[in-house]
Amino acid sequence: MAADTPLALGHPAALEAAPAYPLGELNDYLRVYPRRQPAVRTSTDPLDPVKIAPGVAVPVLLSLGRQDRGQCPLPIEEELAARLPHCELRVYDGGAGGGGHEHARVRERWLREQLGLG
């Protein structure tokens, strides 16, 4: 699986870190409805990629933009990569797009290897 940059929805730090968009939309919502924070945490908790990572049985290629604050900030992604049984993490200097064209080439080569296409 070449997941590129996953969305950290459900991870507790997604609300605490005041991330950029799209995760920032949760903070916008909670500014209007602060009493709903427990409900938001409860409803997004099953989507936490770090929690479900140990159950992923296939090899995973993750890319991360070092400057990403809107999808999966670096500490969450590193935690996710550590919990995935078979993960290759690629960190690039950009934002949420990760490595752009460079990563597209890495991803194609990685997928070809995984599929036995040389």
Image: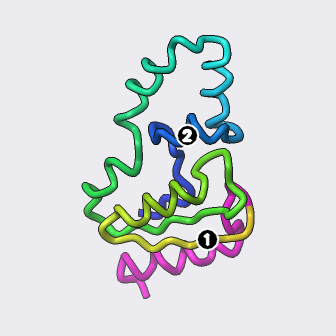
Q: Amino acid at mark 1?
A: Val
The residue segment tinted magenta is: 95-118
The answer to whether 109 is drawn above or below residue 10 in the figure is below
Numbered disc in front, either 2 or 1: 2
Q: Secondary structure at mark 2?
A: helix
State the mark number for residue 14: 2
The image position of residue 116, as x and y in percent, is 36, 82
Q: How would you rate the neighbour count of disc 2 (Cα within 10 Å): few for under 14, some for 14-19, many for 20 or more?
A: many
The image position of residue 54, as x and y in percent, is 28, 57
Q: Amino acid at mark 2?
A: Ala
Quick one: 15 or 48, which is closer to the camera? 15
Q: Which residue is found at the position 65% from the left and 37% from the top?
A: 22
The image position of residue 84, as x and y in percent, is 35, 63
Q: Which residue is found at the position 71% from the left and 40% from the top?
A: 20
The image position of residue 34, as x and y in percent, is 58, 14
Quick one: 26 or 13, which is closer to the camera? 13
Residue 107 figure quarter:
bottom right
The answer to whether 97 is drawn above or below residue 113 in the figure is above
